Structures are given as C-alpha cells and as structure tokens.
Amino acid sequence: MRVGIDVVDDDHQELFALVQEFETASKTSSGQVDGAEIGRILERLQAYVNDHFEREETAQLETGYEGYAENKRQHDELRHTLEKFIDKHRKGEWGDLKAATEHMRSFLAIWLQEHIMKTDRKMRGRILPWVRKRA
Ligand SMILES: [Fe+2]
C-alpha cells in the first residue's frame, strides 16, 4: 500500500504499527484489557497522526497541490474523531473496553487504508520532486 514517497510511506508504516498495538494490548492472557495502556497508545497515536498530517499538509501547501483542501478536510475529520475517542476514554465512557478497542482499531485501520489508497496516492507526482529537493 505504498504512495511512492519514502517519507510518507515510512510514516504510514509507523501509523499501522501503532494501530496494531491496540490489538496486541487487547490480547492479554487474563482476557482483561488494560485501560491505562490503551490510553497511552491513544496518546502516542494522536501525537504521531498530528506530526504526520502536518508533514503532508506542509508539502502540499508548499507545492500548491490542488488536492490540498480535500486532503486537509479528511485529516481534520480524523483529528476530530481521535479527539472524541480520547475524550471518551479519559472520561471512562468506553463501556466494554475490549469491544471498544476493537471497534476503534478496525475503524482506524480501514480509515488509513482508504485514505492512503484514494487520497494520498494522488499526490505522488506533485510532491515527489519537492521532497527530493529537500532530501
Ligand atoms: Fe493524507
């Protein structure tokens, strides 16, 4: 699932690895999900998502990429959704922790996959020369 821009693909790999951590964290031997651990992964994921989106948006803005507005709209949607997930988690409103973790993990995995395939891929030809110039 590559975009063809190394810095972007490396970021995406890291994001999938973080999403995968939710699955590992919910497969404990006791069958109990550690809420604090889920909270820590959520915060690391949010920080990485924010850094990554900023990198993409900066590259798009500086190259005058025509898909910027649509890409930014999708990014803002996920930023907002993540904030809601985290807020609910902090307030202890997740209910069944195992089910909520799985719901969130699959939502994030599908969102990322769709976004990369349908939106990020379009920027390759426009962003690559800019990225190479800066490398
Ligand atoms: Fe993107």
Image (tube, grey):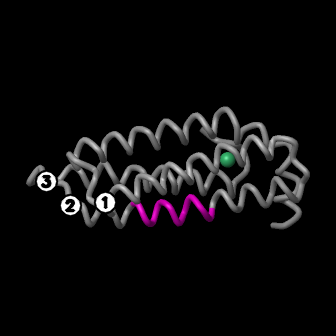
Q: Amino acid at mark 3?
A: Gln
Compared to 99, does 17 lie above or below?
A: below
Q: Which residues are magenta?
A: 42-51
Mark 3–mark 1 contact, CB under 8 Å? no
Which label belongs to residue 34? 2
Please rate how many residues cluster around mark 1, counting C-alpha atoms within 10 Å: few if below 14, some from 14 to 19, many from 20.
some
Distance of mark 1 from mark 2, alpha carbons?
A: 6 Å
> Residue 84 placed where, x, y %?
45, 53
Please rate how many residues cluster around mark 3, counting C-alpha atoms within 10 Å: few if below 14, some from 14 to 19, many from 20.
few
Q: Is mark 2 within 8 Å of ligand 1?
A: no
Q: Is residue 83 magenta?
A: no
Q: Residue at label 1?
A: 38
- Who's the residue at 67% across and 53% down the image? 8
Locate the C terminus and report the quarter of the image it occupies.
Answer: bottom right
Q: Residue at label 3?
A: 32
Which label belongs to residue 94? none
Mark 1–mark 2 contact, CB under 8 Å? yes
> Residue 113 placed where, x, y %?
55, 37
Q: Along the line of sight, which residue is nearer the eye, 46 or 59?
A: 46
